[in-house]
Image (spheres, rainbow, N blue to C red):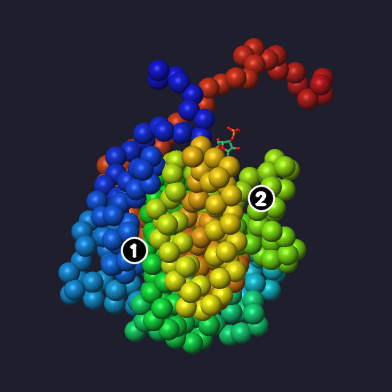
Amino acid sequence: MADELKRGLEGVLVAESDLSYVDGGVGKLVYRGYDIEDLARGASYEEVLYLLWHGSLPGAAELDSFAADLAAEREVNDDVIETVRALADAGERPMAALRTATSMLSAYDPDAEGDGGEATLRQGRRITAKIPTVLAAFERVRQGEEPVAPDPDLSHAGNFLYMLTGTEPDAVSEETFDMALTLHADHGLNASTFTAMVIGSTMADVYSGVTGGIGALSGPLHGGANQDVMEVLHEIDASAKDPVQWVKDRQDDGGRIPGFGHRVYKVKDPRAKILEEKLRDLAESSGDTKWLDYTTAIEEYLTDQGLVEKGIAPNVDFYSGSVYDSLGIPLDMYTPIFAMSRVGGWIAHVAEYQEDNRLIRPRARYTGPEDAEFVPIDER
Ligand code: ACO
């Protein structure tokens, strides 16, 4: 049994965690026991960060001081902004730019050494506060605009939208974006969280873990899928193709439908349900129902086809892109925004794991030759 090979570590237990639980059979997600739906509707992203990092929901005074401490860390060193400019000028992709800039942030952290425990949370707070500043600056520079300095009086969500556009967001946009951040904050041992944990288990500093997490999240099988979904919707729109026909063509080509399927969920992702509802509200209030119509048509078709019943159901990425599009956020910023939220979960898992740390070091079954005879290079 000990030698059983589990490809992709599927179902393998590697740690105990109080942080989040995913019941993929019924489509349930909790953070420290609280249902994601209650948190998404009732708690701010700052409250969720406090919950994940400190173990319980904050009282009003605790939240005020936590949010103020977080907001006070938003500014980034000018050298980082200059690097962000250089990356934007070089045409770097946003996730790669974020990965590079996050790694660079450690140079300006007075206690960037990794000794686990409180240091992980202190560094983590700085990284979480600064990532939105880096991302917004990258986007503005790319658009030929100057970066906007963070406003410590705005919420984490509101400040990001402000730095992105230069205008304070309206209440609906801020609340919608805050909800999206809460929905993406944690999700058990997904690939990027596990990556951060593997790095954290070496007791490296948390900048290394977050940088690795960003790399893992950037892949199309993980965080990159939200952008893929929106690209599909744009493609359908540009070609004036019926969304169902697009899906049929994709299936005929043997391709996968982005935004469907999940390693853990075998029913519709609870986060997708909440975002779908949000998209519906936004579409109804703006009168623009195009993305809602396309996504609904695709989901209905795949449900009728029995794909959803087979466990390949809509995941969080199926609806998040349309919601971000409604907020005017550029398409290739969707995955970085996912990172901007998930960083909270990465830090929580690294800090939790380091409390009772054991170096993560699995092994592979060796299938290579056993008795190869070495031949010196000049005789080969
Ligand atoms: N469209 C069509 N068929 C699919 C899809 C899909 N999106 N996803 C899985 N399948 C099929 C596979 O072809 C496979 O069929 P087969 O057994 O006949 O060969 C079966 O379902 C199982 O697929 P696996 O790849 O083994 O499932 P796994 O658990 O590894 O995949 C994954 C999960 C990678 C997310 C997959 O569903 C996928 O590629 N989805 C599209 C990309 C996506 O939306 N990713 C976002 C995930 S959520 C997140 O990271 C936040």
Tell me the distance, in whole angstroms, between the alpha carbons under discs 2 and 1.
31 Å
Residue 26 percent across, percent down from the top left:
36, 43
Q: Residue at x 68, y 15 (%)?
A: 372
Q: Amino acid at mark 1?
A: Ala
Residue position for label 1: 40
* The residue at label 2 has a CB less than 8 Å from ligand 1: no
Closest to the observer, 251 or 186: 251
* Residue closer to the observer: 201 or 61: 61
Asked if marks 2 and 1 touch (Cβ < 8 Å), the reply is no
The local secondary structure at tag 1 comes to helix
Q: Amino acid at mark 2?
A: Val
- Left or right: residue 282 compared with residue 175: right
Outermost residue toward the bottom in this view: 167
Q: Which mark is residue 247?
A: 2
- At which x and y percent is residue 22? 36, 45
Relative horizontal placement of residue 46, taking residue 172 as reference (left or right)? left
Q: Is residue 379 left or right of residue 346?
A: right
Mark 2 or 1: in front is: 2
